[in-house]
Image (cartoon, helix red, strand yellow):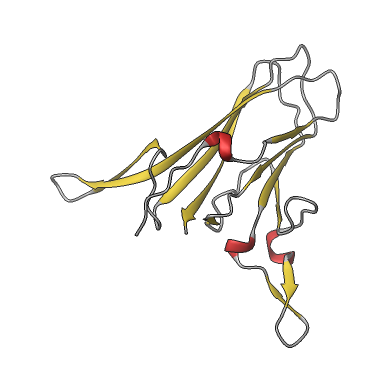
Amino acid sequence: MSIKRLSILGLSALSLVFAAQASALTAKQTVEKEVVTVAADGTQVTTRVPAELVTPGETVVYTVDFVNDSAAAATDLVLAMPVPADVRYLEGTADRSGAVVLYSIDGGSTFDKRDALALPAVGGGTRPARSEEITHIQWTIAGPVPVGASDSLVFKGRLK
């Protein structure tokens, strides 16, 4: 078993798109890992710590915190984050109320609903894409996102 170092700088660039060119958005990405400890009474407590050293099988949490720091409300906000090649996306962890979530299996060139992702199957036809084949996640927030409003987008993965 090896320990891997994850770096925020090592990730592909976070992509931000706005309908209105006058909009501005400040975004910060963090990468943490989940640590489960057992309290004296036997209950499990899950906390997040910086993901400086991660062991295969550990859960990694990718978060983008953003704030609309423009002078106007933002609409049709589209944010996309890559899923690192050595991380397997954990199903359902990118779901978010108030956003349309789409996925890519081709390096972020195209996006579709999770249940619509398919790849060629051995012997012909297609098969559903597996979670480890997801390369990017995209959230679309129709808005408006008010001036000064902040929010977060999150997905989890497991280090391969």
Residue 109 in the image: state x and y as whole percent.
80, 51
Position of 137 with respect to 9 (left or right) is: right
Q: Position of residue 120 (x, y in %)?
A: 75, 76
Mark count: 0
Q: Residue furthest top?
A: 71
Residue displayed at 46% across by 54% down: 159
Where is residue 155 shown, x and y percent of the image? 55, 46
Q: Residue at x 69, y 65 (%)?
A: 115
Q: Residue furthest bottom?
A: 123
The front one of 124 and 141 is: 124
Residue 154: percent from the left, percent from the top?
55, 41
Picture quarter containing residue 125? bottom right
Foreground of the two, 15 or 42? 15
Describe residue 37's horizontal placement relative to residue 85 as left or right: left
Q: Is residue 49 above or below residue 22?
A: below
**Left or right of 27 in this view: 76:** right
Quarter of the figure that contains the N terminus = bottom left
Is 156 rendered above or below residue 113? above
Q: Quadrant of residue 65?
A: top right
Residue at point 73%, 88% (across, down): 123
